[in-house]
Image: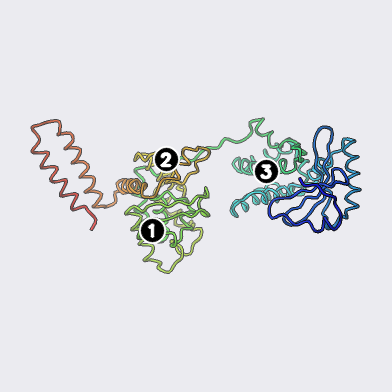
Amino acid sequence: MAQLLLKANVVRDLPLATNGQDFYLDTHTKGLGVRVGTRKKVYFYDGRVGAKKRRVTLGDTDTLTLNDARKLAKKTAVEMLNGIDQNKVKAEERARAMTLGEALDLYEQNHDLRERTISENRRLINYNFSDWLERDIKGISPSVVERRFDEISERSPSSANHAFWVLRAILNHARIATKTDAGEYTLPPNPCQRLTDLNRWHKSHARTVRLTEEQFPAFFEALTDAQNAIFADFMELLIRSGLRRTEAASLSWSNVNLTAKTFTITADIAKNGQALTLPMSTQLEALFKRRKEATPDACNVFAEAKMYDPRKSLIALRKVIGLDLTYHDCRRTFLGIAEEQAVPYGLLKKMGNHSTGNDVTMKHYANTVEHETLRPYMQRVNDQIDRLAGIDNEALKVADQIDRLNKVCEALSEFDKYKCEIADLQDVVKRLEQRNQPQ
């Protein structure tokens, strides 16, 4: 930290920092200094409150004269000698005056949130805590939290959980943001902790709904008979790719490569913020080509629908299959079949574009997987869907027959007397493989 005799013209001529901050201490008034940033210069005073070092901001050099800064420095020195910590006082004043609405604004400013998340957070706060927005957050006590939680729970337990999860995050951030420079809290502990201490959070029951083997034929028959071809292809894409509804609805043709037979979910659309390129199975390739022929000039695969949600078609589909099917149930069905088809766990997470969390090994593994590694597994899942649905797939039937013949040859190989028969079967297998090669 440079030391120099501060004068008005010296302070004026100090160059702004190119990056970070530069500090200059005055040789005339002990503890007085100038902090120079990239945009402005500020007077400060360095001293101690008891044994603790403190740096107190006095004011901008543009609005505070050097003489006034010296007077404030001497006044601050006396206050520190008397045990008054101006930083703590300022932080407490800020915390005392902060309302829930201001805490929400602060939370959004300091977090890189998606527009969808910001909108949902504000909806939950405005709907459930509108009468708290102008209330000082210090006035939100644990007992008040408990009563409001019970009120919302009577209407919807899951809504109560979600609303208070958001509130807890906002109050946690406000408590951290209003700490003093010494790291001391100026706000009391989060009142939402009362819900944890009393074990009041509602248990969440994960949905496990997926299509059963008996429902697959009816599902695909309903898609074939659907009056809305876009809806039919949309639902088929969900169940054959495992995409989330918003990922599929927002898929643009610029991210579909029919030559490489891949499609990409961009980072701004993906739930975990990570782009994912997936390979097409032969069934998905046919679906994309069908969509392109139907709407050749559209920007999005599903016309111009950003959030495709045809409720009437979905209700009709539910009646046919006898299941209250959701879009996410299609994704769950895909991942369930992938697991049954022995897709390795790491590849399964990659295909579903699931977050790897704090698993460093999985994070490294998932980031190194290329879409070509996933291609045979994507094809395997889609072939199994065809089998379950009873779809007439000549190539798949031949492939299954080849697989059965190979297993017969393997079983007969233990017996020398069947060598001729094995050779004949292998010849049949070879001819079937040649005939099943794509033209």
Query: Relative to the observer, which residue lies in front, 102 or 156?
Result: 102
> Which three-letter amino acid code belongs to the residue tagged 1?
Ala
Residue located at (19% from left, 49% from top) = 433
Q: Which mark is residue 226?
A: 1
Q: Secondary structure at mark 1?
A: loop
Answer with left or right where residue 28 lies relative to residue 117. Answer: right
Q: Quadrant of residue 408?
A: top left
> Which three-letter amino acid code belongs to the residue tagged 3?
Leu
Q: Badge 3 is on which residue?
A: 167
Determine the CA span between mark 2 and mark 1. 36 Å
Mark sitting earlier along the chain (2/1): 1
At which x and y percent is residue 348? 41, 42
Binning the other alpha carbons within 10 Å of mark 3 as few (below 14), some (14 to 19) or many (20 upward) gives many
The residue mark sitting in front, 2 or 3, is 2
Residue located at (83% from left, 56% from top) = 10
> Which three-letter amino acid code belongs to the residue tagged 2?
Gly
Q: Secondary structure at mark 3?
A: helix
Mark sitting earlier along the chain (3/1): 3
At which x and y percent is residue 245? 48, 52
Q: Are marks 3 and 1 in contact (CB under 8 Å)?
A: no
Q: Which mark is residue 346?
A: 2
Answer with left or right where residue 358 lies relative to residue 27. Answer: left
